[in-house]
Amino acid sequence: MLNRLLRASPYVVVQLAAIYLYQVAGRIEFPAAPGRIGPDFWPKSILVLLGLVCVYEIIKNLLIGETFTAAGLLEKLMKDSGANESEEQLRSYPLLLVGGILLTVVYVATIDKLGFFLATIAYLALFMVIGRYRRWGVIAIASVLGSLGLMFIFMKVVYVSLPLGTEPFSAVSLWLLATMGVH
Amino acid sequence: MDALIHLGNGFLQVLQPANLLVLCIGLVLGMLVAVLPGLTLVMGVVLALPFTYTMELLPAIILLTAMYVSGTYGGAFTAILFRIPGEPIDVPLLWDGYTMARKGQPAKALGWTLFAALGGGLITTLVMVLASGPVATFALTFSSPEYFAIIIFGLASVVSLGGGSITNAAISLMLGLLIATVGVDSIYGSERFAFGVPFLQDGIEYLLVMVGAYGLGEVFTRLEKGFAGDGTTADTDRRISTEFPTLAEMLRLKMTFLRSSLVGIVVGIIPGAGATVASFVAYGAEGQYGKRGKELGSGIAEGIVAPQTAATSSVGGAMIPLLTMGIPGSGATAIILGAFLLHGMQPGPQVFVTSGPFVYAVFASIFLGVIGMCVIGYFAIKPLVKVLELPEAVVSAFVVLFCFIGAFAARNNLSDLYVIMGFGILGYLFEKFKFPIAPMVLGVILGPLAESSFMTMMVSHSNDWTVLIGRPISATVMVMTVIAVVYPIQRQLRERTRRSGAQQ
């Protein structure tokens, strides 16, 4: 039963979201014109179809316990060829994943304050460490040169205005920009 | 005759130093992403997209199409030499390419691959040049019901021909269509699913969905599986060379070559299929119809020529609906369509009327790209396979950064970084629960077009949806749509019933 629940869980989540969004779509405000469909018709139609597919999967997985599922052509070709087998044998490292996601969230949250250069040095180095890479010299060089290189390419060549950070961190960014000749 | 003159002018445009440089960069990048661990062709094209923001439209499209073309070829090196398929496209090359290499003929196997990529690429370019004009002229007769039917067919094909289960692909597609509705609608000006959040009122940029789901999602998935510590352990220092097949050998395989080119072009044209399906289908067709079909898998040339020819041929096929109807057939062409839209150009039937010289320049760039990729493949194979030694953790860290910079550069808005973070996690969950990403991306890109053609159709025909089946072209396309969805389900159900019957 637990297996059935697990298999059905993504569809239950999507189904609940679809029901909620259908209610939200019902509250879309627009100047109604007689004989014309409104801006709610299209999203509502998609949500109904989405709900029907989810109901089918929930009944199939949870109530009937059926595991057969019709595959897309590419999926079937890969399956028949055995091309996916080696990948499925790989181990799983959920802690690395959580660490990587958290680090990325922190990077996004702090880039405005630290500025692109400093935040990126820290991010690159820590991401490589989380990715189980342990050549410290390579990590240091790749992080520093990588951050500098990206800053140079995007701010000097491609003209993207990357975040400079706030005081006192912005001083580092401004000094680097002046050194690179970016005004 | 006009086409030839336009094509000649197209060559002149592409041969300008700046465009030629962009072409070469695109070819090398395409090959690198096809070889690099942790990078797929589609991801590579996504990551290159931000670099095109400040470019003119032509070099931007040259860069991305060059990557697309050479990405179908680069992974063959590592598949044949080290049994490492850079892309799913290259999996069929393991069976005969790697086997031939193991029998002591790696140079010959690489030579056959080069012949197949060059021949398939040139044929597909020729077909693309000859067919695009007439297809666009035909498409000019389309009205909103025909357009809507074709978009629905494209979306249905993505569901039935792509990866994952058909129901999961359908859910992915519908989520993409829903994401496309977020923001202020273009007809009534009503706010939909914005929940009072300012950046949602502007809508969700398809670029953020692509970069997040394809780029970040893939990195998170690979991080969970554990990156390869120091790159590959394959012996990339050994002597690597390419030996061309003789003319007599090539002529012996002419039917294989023609059959696979045809498969590649047709599969490329069908939305949702693309190079991987073409490569597998051509290999299967060779097994069924080839003279030496029963020997496939034992390291014969037919097993190399068939998938590689079809993979490269599919590129030209996929460009036809993209340029003439604005319908992308695969992840890579969806991103190329994104580049068109970012530069304010909507490909479609009018494109030959409004931007004829531009389209022929794109054709010329693909033609030169095919030749260029083979020249690079012949002379630079050794440094190309050397990138296998790059540690995956280092490559992935930079991939994430390119994703962020790409997303930020589009609007200089830090909120967009949170959006791609969200789509990165969604992309990871999709991979985890085996929901394909491509239908969602195509749904986000084609959603507005689908909705506007649907609304126009309903307004023009007094809310009578039966117009879809009352007009010959749209009715034919709708029948094809039903077949595209129902046939594979019905076939697999029948297969399953037969199998369970045999077991009893």
Image: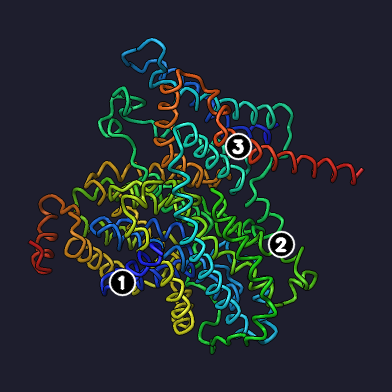
Among the two numbered marks 3 and 2 on one chain, the one whose residue lies closer to the N terminus: 2
Quarter assignment of residue B239: bottom right
| Whole-percent x, y for residue B121 in the image | 51, 69
Quarter assignment of residue B63: bottom left
| Whole-percent x, y for residue B347 in the image | 37, 48
Q: Residues within 10 Å of mark 2 (few under 14, many from 20)?
A: some
Residue B285 badge: 2
Camera sees residue A27 = yes
Q: Which residue is mark 1?
A: B12
Among the two numbered marks 1 and 3 on one chain, the one whose residue lies closer to the N terminus: 1
> How are the residues colored?
rainbow
* Left or right: B12, with B302 as reference point: left
* Left or right: B307, with A141 as reference point: right
Q: Which residue is mark 3?
A: B476
Which residue is more in the foreground, A55 or B457?
B457
Residue type pointed to by label 1: Leu
Q: CA distance from mark 1 to mark 2?
A: 39 Å
Discs 1 and 3 carry the same chain letter: yes
The chain that hosts pointer 2 is B
Residue type pointed to by label 2: Ala
For the point 34% across and 52% down, the residue is B339
Q: CA distance from mark 1 to mark 3?
A: 41 Å
Residue A93 badge: none
For the point 50% across and 57% down, the residue is B131
Q: Secondary structure at mark 3?
A: helix
Among the two numbered marks 1 and 2 on one chain, the one whose residue lies closer to the N terminus: 1
